[in-house]
Image: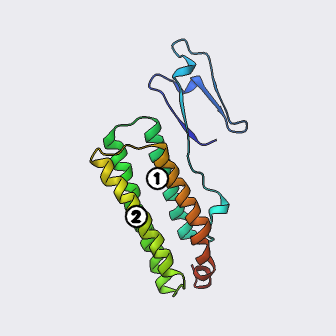
Amino acid sequence: MTGTIYHSKLPLTCVNLDPADNILSLNRCSYLEERSILLIMSIMKWSEDLSVQVKEIDQQHQRLIDLINKLHEAMLAKQGKQVVSQIIDELAAYTVYHFQAEEKYMQQFKYIGYLTHKKEHEGFVQEVEKFQTDFNAGKLGLSIEIMNFLRDWVTRHIKGTDKQYSSVFKENGL
């Protein structure tokens, strides 16, 4: 089970997390009420079906997933705007870095799907930048719809578009 427990008064000895059964249980703690626990589950999980079989790119994809989960956890834990804004900025910057790395290899290896792939990247970057701008201006809050968009787009993009370049990247030594 992947998750984070947030509670300001909760000592670790009060919580049992059984990964085999995915069960969270509480030991008896005199000052704790069960309803005050917030267990935050990751919105995305890395799995082999997301692998493009290129170590460097898989590691970058895992980092993107980590950042999306970090943002999700911050949202559910109701962390302040400054904390959430920093995570959004980090996610936006890392996304650009990752896309540039993929596109560099696509150009280097003369990948036939480069232009279409680049357009998908540009569309996603525009959406993230719009969200980033609106969030920082106070026009938009972080919501589960936004988290679902990030999760779904990244999953669909990796499983669909990114997997199409795997053989070309591997044939060229990546």
Residue 84 is situated, as x and y percent measured from the top left of the image, at: 37, 44
Q: Which mark is residue 67?
A: 1
**Residue lying at 49% horizontally and 43% vertically, measured from the top left:** 144
Left or right of 63? Residue 23 is right
Task: Measuring from the top left, give residue 64's x and y in whole percent.
Answer: 49, 58
Q: Which mark is residue 170?
A: none
Q: Secondary structure at mark 1?
A: helix
What amino acid is found at the position of numbered circle 2 in the picture?
A: Val
Q: Quadrant of the C terminus?
A: bottom right
From the viewer's side, name the closer residue of 159 and 168: 159
Q: Which residue is mark 2?
A: 125
Which residue type carries mark 1?
Leu
Residue 8 image point, x, y percent: 44, 25
Q: Is 81 above or below relative to 123?
A: above
Q: Is residue 99 left or right of residue 43?
A: left
Residue sticking out furthest to the top:
30
Q: Which residue of the protein is positioned furthest toward the left in this rendering?
A: 137
